[in-house]
Amino acid sequence: MNDADLAASVWRLERSRLIGAAAKLLHDLDEAEDCAQDALIAALETWPRDGQPNNAAAWLMTTTRNRALDRLRRRQMLAREHEALAADDEAAQAHVTPDFVPGLDLARERALLGDEQLRLIFIACHPVLAREAQVALTLRLLGGLETGEIARAFLVPEATLAQRIVRAKKALVGQSYELPPPDQWAERLDAVLAVVYLIFNQGHADVRTELCDEALRLVRQLQHLLPDEAEVQGLAALLEIQASRLPARLDAEGQPVLLLEQDRRRWDRLLIRRGLAALARAEQLSEAAGAGSYTRQAAVAACHARAARAEDTDWAAIVAGYDRLLALQHSPVVALNRAVAVSHAQGPAAAWPLLQALAQEPRLRDYPYLAGAQADVLERLGHNADAREAYLRAAALSDSPVQQQLLRARAAKLRG
């Protein structure tokens, strides 16, 4: 691998950790991002001349930290903050001689929360921010998702989401970037779970297994950390079951395969068993208070996992599951999923009025999955020309190459 490719590849993997290290020093996310970017530029300039380092990730971390320390030193000198300068004199030696006290702090944090990425997510989900801002900012900084991808997950325009992130960064200037004590984790847990959920969803939609694997790793850490939290178990169940289907998502030629057409022998039975066990635990923990959103979604996913063949799927149970989910969380996306389930439980004619009503929902106006669902129902009703047009519209609205490929293939079958 050449110098530029290595630098870019390692930087993408380490980006969130680099930003987290700089933010801890600077308490400013914009400046922290700049420091991480400066480290990449430095790598692109120096590695071709001096050779690739033995540990590229450590090189980038040291460079990012040094850039942050330089900024901190300039900031403090300009402000003549003598006490801060004295503290910075100690911090500035950290890249030369190991600093014992910060080392102890880091060791203590890792003992509490052993996964570095998860630790940073807890820090970024700061309670000074509204929940949507917490999730959007954390996904942008730590989840490896672009602003446009996050905007589509929230069903908002990209410009709106970008402004939300900018405001969130400003709100966090000067706030503590330390891991909160365990008794404060609960107030951040909803946002943390939402981040992990959306990372997985993006990976699942695009068959980006590295994102799915990262989300699974994080949720398993949360299970270990918070074994008695029902929604942690519910999210774990949902992701394990959804991930079990990934081996069957693409055929031998790399073409996407619809859920009902997948070879279920290729589903990962170990992940299904893990998911069903986590679901049983979630339902046990939530028996008194009632199941939460992730647990109810996992129950729907379990209906598919338990069906040995597509024709064995209990669609009535799935519709009922979405009814329970809608009672808890009135979301147009959940309503769309329910309409799709109705099309299989009661027939496409029963689903069409539901889809027509959802087409009036502003947040779904340019949602590719609504157009795709309309196309499927129209095809099953025998309206091939309208179905083809809807498939092509869904493909045009989607930014996922996998989904575009599938939708255009289905449209091509209806040509003429």
Image (spheres, rainbow, N blue to C red):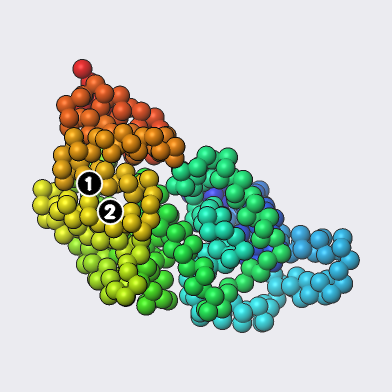
Residue 92 coordinates in the image, percent (x, y): 75, 70
Q: Look at mark 2 in the image and give the residue it sits on.
A: 322
Which residue does the image show at 14% across and 53% down from the upper left? 314
- What residue occupies the far top of the structure in this picture? 416
Task: Mark 2: give few (<14), some (14-19) or many (20+) Cα within 10 Å.
Answer: many
Q: Secondary structure at mark 2?
A: helix
Would residue 355 be seen by someone viewing this image from the given angle? yes
Number of the label disc, if any, that sits on residue 291: none
Amino acid carrying label 2: it is Tyr
Which residue does the image show at 30% across and 61% down from the upper left? 296
Amino acid carrying label 1: it is Ala
Lower sequence index among marks 1 and 2: 2
In space, the residues marked 1 and 2 are separated at their CA atoms by: 9 Å
* Above or below 55: residue 314: above
Evaluate if marks 1 and 2 touch, with contact meaning CB atoms under 8 Å apart: yes
- Name the side, left or right, on which 353 lies relative to 45: left
Task: Mark 1: give few (<14), some (14-19) or many (20+) Cα within 10 Å.
Answer: many
- Name the side, left or right, on which 129 lies relative to 83: left
Q: Look at mark 1 in the image and give the residue it sits on.
A: 341
Would residue 268 be seen by someone viewing this image from the given angle? no
Which residue does the image show at 81% across and 72% down from the upper left? 84
Residue 265 coordinates in the image, percent (x, y): 14, 54
Residue 377 coordinates in the image, percent (x, y): 22, 34
Which residue does the image show at 55% across and 63% down from the upper left? 125
Residue 383 coordinates in the image, percent (x, y): 20, 24
Q: Secondary structure at mark 1?
A: helix
* Above or below 313: residue 179: below
- Name the side, left or right, on which 274 lies relative to 37: left
Please give the count of numbered marks on the rendered protein.
2
Quarter of the figure that contains the C terminus:
top left
* Nearer the observer, 364 or 83: 364
